[in-house]
Image: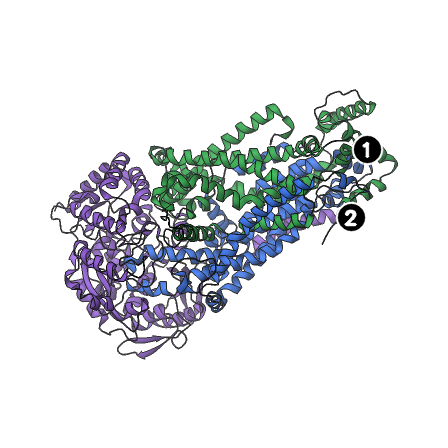
Amino acid sequence: MKKITRILSGFCAAALMTSSLAGCQTKNASSDVKTSGKEIPTLTVWTIGNQPKNLDEGLAAMNDYTAKKIGVKINLKVAGWGDWETKMNQIINTSEYFDFMFSDNTKYAQQVSQGALAEITDEDLKAVPGLTKLIPEDVWSGAKIKGKLYAIPAYKDSAQTEYWIWDEAIVKKYHIDTKNAITLKQLDPILREIKKGEGAKNKNFYPFIVDFDGVKGMLMNYDDMTLGLPTIGVRVDDPERKVVSVLEQPEVMEDLSILHSWMEDGIMNKDAAICTELPRYRTVFSTQAYPGLEKSFAINMDISDGNTVMEKMAGPVYTNSTIQGSLQVISKQSKYKAECLKYLELLNTDRTLRDMWSYGKEGVNFNYVDKEKGVVKRVIGMDWGLPGYAQGTSATRSVDEGVPTDQWEQIKKLNEAAEKSVILGFTFDREPVRNEVQNVRAVWDKYKNNVKTGAKDPHEIVPQVIQEMKAAGMDKIIAEAQKQIDEQFKK
Amino acid sequence: MQQRFGRLYEAETLLSGISLFRLEVEIFVGYEDIRHGENQGRCDCMKEIRVEQEEKKRTKKRWTRDDTELSLLALPTTIWFLLFCYLPMFGIIIAFKDFRITGGFWQSFIESRWCGFENFVFLFTSDAIKVVTRNTILYNIVFIILGIVVPVTLALMIGQLHNKRAGKVYQTAMFLPYFLSWVVVSAVVWGFLSIDKGLVNQIIQSHGGEGVSWYDTPGFWPPFLIFMNMWKGLGYGMVVYLATITSIDSTYYEAAIIDGATKWQQMKYITLPLLKTVIVMMFIMSVGRIFYSDFGLFYQVPRGASSLYNVTYTIDVFVFQQLKTASTGMASAAAFVQSVLGCATILVTNAIVKKFDRENALI
Amino acid sequence: MTTKVTYQSGLEKFNRIKPGTNVLFNFIFLILAIMCVVPVLFVLMISLTSEKALENGYQFIPKEFSFEAYKFLAQQGHLIFPALGISVFVTVVGTVIGVILTTTLGYVLSRREYKLNKLLTWMVFIPMVFNGGMVSSYYINTNLLHLKDSVWALILPIAVSSFNVIICRTYFRTTIPDSVIESAKIDGASELRIYFRIVLPLSLPVLATIGLFLCFGYWNDWFQSMLYIDNQRMYSLQALLNMTMQNVEYLSKNRAFMGVEAAQLVANLPKEGSRMAIAILIILPIACAYPFFQKYFISGLTVGSVKE
C-alpha cells in the first residue's frame, strides 16, 4: 500500500509538471471578435514606455473608438525602457507574431536586413492618403532603405536642432551674450568666468556638466549613415559625399581639445566618462529642442521661479538617423497589413486617438482644457507614462497646458527650414563588411567614453583609436560605404 | 536527523548486526583503504566484504525491479531535462546558418543559408578577443583557487568556535552580500569610489591628500574585483562545505579523540578526506566554467569605464556588447564557442582527476 | 530553534580549540562579518537620505534624514505589491519543485548499481557545458510549451541545474553508507521506500542546501521576467528593480532623439534613494528566510550525535 502511494506521488510530480504546461495557453495572437456579423481583427502592437496603471481601461476606450471608426482593435503591449532592446530582439529573432511595433534608427536597418519587416509599397500607401498628405517627401525618403520603404516615420521634430539652454539668472549675472556663445571656443572664456565666480564657494561646482555621451550635438554635422559609429560619416553639406574618418577632422579635434582642457581645469565634471545620470540643474547644456520651451526646461531644472534662455546651437538638419528616430514597422508575417496601415493613418490624423495614446483615458488620466485648440491638463498621480514621440506625429497631438498652442507650427517651420543631408535616403548596407563593422565597434566601445567627453588628451588618444580601428578594418568600411553612396547617387 | 539514525540502529536487529559490524570496521580500519579495495588483512570481515562485492558484480547485468523503481524516481527530472535542455539544442545549428526571416521561425530556420564558419570569423579576427580571453582565464584561475581554499578554511574554522550561536550570527552576516544584486553593489561602489563625491576620496581630502580617480586606475581593479567577488560569494560558497561537514559522523571524531588525536590530526585524517569528494566536484565544475564569468561583476561594477577595458572586460561582457548589433547567427556562434571550450576543459580536467582518484571524478 | 548541542561528558570540552585560538577565530570572523554588513547598512542609509543631500554624494550618516524614498515607493505600491506577490509565489513554488526534481535525480545517480546510471550522468552533464542558446530556448518555451506571459515561465526553466544535481549525487554517495541501504534491502524494502523513508530523512543538510540555492536563485532572478513576461504588472520584484535602474541609463543615452520629453520622463523616474529603497525591500524577505535554512547545516557541526 505504501509502495503504491510512493509510486503515485512520483507520478503526481510528473503530472504536476505536464499539466502546468498544458494549462497555460498562449494569449491568442490575434483573436477575431465577431460583432454584428463583421469580424473585428485585434492587432498585436508593441510600444515602449512605462506601463500605465490603468492600461486596460485606456486600451478599452481606444478600442471602442477605433472599432467604430475603422473596425480595428489593438492589443497594446508595453516594453520598459531598459527591456525594450532585448525584448524586441527576441521577438524579431524568433519570428514571434506581432502586427506592428515601434522601432528606431538603432534597430531599423538591422531588422530590414534580417527580413523581418513588411515592405510598404506605393500601392499600400494609396489606401492611406491621410499619411501621404501629412508626411513630406523628405521624411519619407529618410525612412527608405535602398529605395524601399519599410516603416511609417513619425513626423515630429524630425529635423535635429540643438539648443544651448542657459539658466537665465546666470546669464543676467555675468552679462552673457548668448548669441555669441555658440561654439565651444566662444564658450570657453565665459565658462571660465562663471567658474571663478560661482566656484569660489563650492570647489565642486562645475559650470559645464556632461554624461558619458559627451556634448549632445557636437558631431551633428556628420551623417553617420545609421551605422551608429560616430567615427565614420559624411559631412551633411559635402556636395561630393565623401565618407571620412570623423575624429580626424580638424574642427572635431579642436572641440575635443577644448573639452579636455575644461576637464583638466575643473570647468567640466571630472567623472564625465562614467557619469550615467545627470543632475537636474545644470548652468548650461545642449539638447534637442524647439522654440517655446523655456519654461518647461526651467521646471525640469528646478528653477521654476526663474527661467531659461534658449539659443540655437546647430541645425535644423535632416539626416536618416534623425528621421528614423521614431518609426512604426509592420511585421512581414502580419496577417493584417492593410488594417495596420489604416490604424496608423487614424493615429496620425485623428486628434482624439492621438491624445488617447499620449495622455490616456479622458477624465481619468487627463482632461481637455480646450479641445478645439488642443490643450490638455494631466491628472496628477495618474500619469499615463507612454512617450508621445514613440507613437506618431506631433501634428495632431494636443499640448500640455502652459505650452504655446502654436508649438507644432514652430516645429514645422524648423523642419521645413532644415538642411537636408546630402545622403538623405541612403542607408548603409553593412552585410559585405559585417565582420569589420563588429570589430570596429568593439574598438569604439573600448574608447568611446574617454574620447567623447575629452577625458583623455585627444591628441594622444585619437591617433591610438584610429590606429586600432584601421587594424580592425575601418578603411574597408569607408571604401564600401563610398562605393554604395556613389552607386546610389550617381544619377 | 541524528536521532533517526540512532533509532534505525536500534530497529535493525539480528540481520543488520552484520551490517553494523561492517560499519564499525570501516571506521576503524580506514575508510579509504576499503574503497580502494586493498587487502589490509587486518580482519576477516574484509574478505567477507570483498566476496560480497564480487557477487554484486555478477548480478550487475540483469535489469531488476529496483532499476524500474529508480527509473520512476528519475522520470520527472528526466522529462525536465529533455524539454528544457535537449529540445533547444538544435539552436546550436543557428551558429552555422545565415539566419534570415522568411516566414515563421521554423520556415526561416530551414530556409536560411548554411554558411559554415562564417559567423565565427568576427570572434577570431577581433583583437579584443585575445584581451578578453586572457582576462577571463586569469580571473577564473584566481577565483577557482580562492573559491575553494577560503570557504573550506572558513567552514572548518566556524565549526570550532566555542560559541555556536556566534557562529550562526557570523555566517548569516557573511551571507548578506549575496542578497545584493550587482546593480546595487555597483551603486555602492560608486558611492565609495566616485571621484569627488565618493567616501574614500572625501576621507583622503579631509586629511589633505589628493583624491584618486579610481575609475581611471587600471592597476587597482584586478585585486579589487577579486576582492568583490570573494566578498559576495563567501557565505554562499561556505554552505556546501558546511553541509558536508555537518553530516560527518561524529563517531569518527570520538574514536580519534580516544586515540589521542590533536585538532590538526582530526582535520587532516577525518574532515579533509571526507570533504575531498565535494572539493574535487566543485573544482571540476568550476574549471568547466573557466570561460564564463559573472556578468554582473565585470559589467556593472566598473560602469563601462573606458580606461578599465583592458583589465575588466571578460568574454561574456564582450559578447554581450557585440550581440546588441550582431546578427542571430553571430550570437549563436559566440555561445557555441564558449560551450565547446567549456566542454573541452571539463573533460580534460575530469580525465586528469580520474588518473589520480578514480572515485571522485565526475563521470 | 537550538538543536542537539549536547556535550558528552567532557569529551567535547576536551576536544575544543584553545581559548586563544578561539579569540583569534572570533576576531577574524568579526572582521569578515563587519565587511559584509557595512555595505548593506550603507544602502539602507542612502535610502533614508533626502534626494537633495544625495546630489552632493553619498554620506554614511545622512546629512538630511528623509523617508521620501519610501513614500515614493508607497505611491508606486500598485507596481510593487504585485511584484512582491509574484516573487514570493515563484520562490516558494519554484523551490519546492526544484528540490523535488533535483534530489530525486541526484539520489538515483548516486546508486552505482543502477543500470542507466552512466546514461543519466551524461544526460545531466552535457547541458552543463552545452546549451542551445537563447534564441532556441525562447522559441521552445514560447511556441512549444506556451509559457509566454505565464508565471510558469519564471519557475520551470530554471528549476533544475546540473550543478545542483551533481552536488546532490556527491552528497548521497559520501554520506549514505551502502550498508544502510543494503540492510534495508535485506529487510525487503523497495527502492522507492528506501528513498522516501530512509535516505530523505538523513539528507536534511543537502535538502536545505539545494533549497537555499534555489530559493535565492528564484528570488534574485530578473532575466526570465524580462524575456517572457509581456505585462509589466507580472514582473518579479528583482526584475522591476532592474528595469528601473536600466530605465535611467536608456533615457540618458537616447535623449538626443527624444527631445524635450526626455527631461519630463526622467523627472518621473525613481531617484537614487528610491532605488536603494527597492534594493532594501528585496533584501529583507530573503534575509529573514535565511535562518530557516541555516539551522540545518550549522547545528551539530562537530557534535553530531549518533549514539543517543
Q: Colour of chain A?
A: purple
Q: CA distance from mark 1 to mark 2?
A: 25 Å
Question: Is disc 2 placed on a helix, strand or loop?
Answer: helix
Question: Is disc 1 placed on a helix, strand or loop?
Answer: helix
Which amino acid lies under the numbered mark 2 shown in the image of this protein? Answer: Lys
Residue assigned mark 1: B19
| Chain whose colour in the figure is blue | C
Q: Are marks 1 and 2 in contact (CB under 8 Å)?
A: no
Instruction: Output the chain of dot 1.
Output: B
Number of the label disc, if any, that sits on residue A246: none
Residue A161 in the image, given as x and y percentages of width and height: 21, 60
Q: Is residue B273 above or below residue C7?
A: above
Q: Residue furthest right?
A: B14
Q: Colour of chain B?
A: green
Which amino acid lies under the numbered mark 1 shown in the image of this protein? Answer: Ser
Q: Which quadrant is the C terminus of chain C positioned in?
A: top right
Q: Which quadrant is the N terminus of chain C positioned in?
A: bottom right
Instruction: Output the chain of dot 2.
Output: A
Number of the label disc, if any, that sits on residue A2: 2
Residue A449 in the image, given as x and y percentages of width and height: 31, 47
